[in-house]
Image: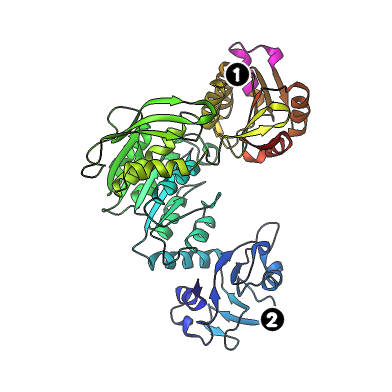
Amino acid sequence: MYALAELLDALAPGLGSTPGALDVMVRRVCIDSRQASAGSLFVAFKGERVDGHDYVAQAFAAGAVAALVERPVTGGAWIDTGRGEAGGPIVAPVEVIVSDALAALQAWARARRAARPDVMVVGVTGSVGKTTTKEAIAAVLREGMVTLKSEGNHNNEIGLPLTLMELEPHHQCAVLEMGMYALGEIAALCAIAQPTIGVVTNVGPTHLERLGTIARIATAKEELVRALPEDGWAVLNGDDARVRAMAAATPASVVTYGLEVGNAVRATDVAAQGLEGVTFRAEATSAVRGAGQEPHRDIVLRALGRHAVMAALPAIAIGLVQGLSWEQIQAGLLAQGQGLRLTPRRGRGGTTVLDDAYNASPASMLAALDVLKDLPGRRVAVLGDMLELGAYDAEGHREVGRRAAEAVDVLLTVGVRAQRIAQGARAVGLDASAVRCCYRAGEAMRALEALLRPGDYVLIKASRSMGLEALVDALVEDAV
């Protein structure tokens, strides 16, 4: 909770002394009037289809004490930050008038972060695995520190500031996911968040359609490590040559992680345990672990698949450099549970649904198929279009198809692009009778209803805009 005066001073120094500004207390910031509640500050963004200004009155009715607006709306109390004047003493609910609502929100977040230099901020970026890695790091750090983390997909120019606005006096660290669509966007997020630790998971063709080349994607991700301070840490995937090369671009200390020899934090003896998770041995050099720490520890994850190890390793690295014990690190990783992706759920009619419909890229598709491949019983994959692959679109889909041929008994594709998945699978020998191409999720659902039987494992995965969550909802009964 913080006084509106603090936010006003971030926009116009001295404006916080306006009578009444200290008495309006903000509990949280929201951008959806349906989420407004007592003590909220509602940010009225004007989008292409919806204008938040039309919902200010609704937010006030729900208990919001203030609204960030670009023009007066309700005719009630107001303060104009550009002109530096108010329509009388500030009383809730009040409209805070600015020229640019997004810039104002970002300025507030920047001020909140600057006011807490004691908070350790961890930034996480990469083409694949950002969210899972962020969750693992936060789970580990919570074993020794009061930790704030970005929720859901709050990883952009709006979501990251919203997370920083939740910083409270008791927080000791914040773990923030950082996404991007263009060069300069991660640098802009870093200017707001001032990260002290930066994690880069990998560089791949995700958003290739927007950035044009893999090299430009690497340059965009590198903005995070360039922004780190000299006393910070760059935690880099040492198995990815493009990420490993970023060590030369950062003033911070560098720790690499991966499966290959030479990484400061390394996983060996990786063994998938089906739906029970995965086990491995974590090894750490003396440069990472504290005095008296054992050089290795057998680790158990509840998350599925060998690829889950790559999300756990940076969490282990950060835990060790922050002085956490192996026991705390293991406890945090177990507390993470099965995570937000590739979640097994009890399906109708004795089936098991592997829910990974949130998003997709070639790398994450291949990883999910590897999990499916190791499971007993008949294996069914429902794979939809992967978007924003640019020049890699055709080959990326065919590559997934070739891996699917090794992993599945039945393949359903959804969407025009995903037809190339079917082509790739048939090209390497998957029987044509085991492959069906569908254009929409409804068509795929009808096909599944006809073919599924008890004991089947069904993987559902695609880019989010394909809407395959509807298939999951239709197929599941409860979590496994």
Instruction: Determine which quarter of the picture holds residue 291.
Output: top left
Q: Residue flagged by tag 1: what amino acid is it?
A: Gly
Q: Nearer the viewer, residue 291 or 447?
A: 291
* Magenta stretch encompasses residue 353: no
Instruction: Determine which quarter of the picture holds residue 64.
Output: bottom right
In the image, residue 313 lies at what x, y percent?
A: 38, 37
Q: Residue flagged by tag 2: what amino acid is it?
A: Gly
- Give me the C-alpha separation between circle 2 and circle 1: 62 Å
**Is the image coloured rainbow, by chain, by secondary structure, or in one colour?**
rainbow
Q: Which quadrant holds the C terminus?
A: top right
Mark 1: few/some/many CA within 10 Å (<14, 14-19, 20+)? many
In the image, residue 386 lies at what x, y percent?
A: 60, 33
How many marks are shown on the rendered structure? Answer: 2
Task: Determine the residue positioned at 34% across, 54% down.
Answer: 196
Q: Which residues are magenta?
A: 421-434
Task: Determine the residue positioned at 56% across, 22% down.
Answer: 375
Task: Determine the residue positioned at 51% across, 32% down.
Answer: 304
Task: Determine the residue positioned at 71% across, 23% down.
Answer: 437
Considering the numbered disc 2 on the image, is that residue within a helix, a strand or a loop?
Answer: loop
Q: Nearer the viewer, residue 310 or 435?
A: 310
* Magenta stretch encompasses residue 423: yes
Of the numbered discs in the image, which one, if any, rests on residue 75?
Answer: 2
Instruction: Determine which quarter of the picture holds residue 25.
Output: bottom right
Q: Earlier in the sequence, mark 2 or mark 1?
A: 2
Of the numbered discs in the image, which one, if any, rests on residue 424?
Answer: 1
286, above or below 399, in the image: below
Q: Is residue 72 left or right of residue 142?
A: right
Considering the numbered disc 1 on the image, is that residue within a helix, a strand or a loop?
Answer: helix
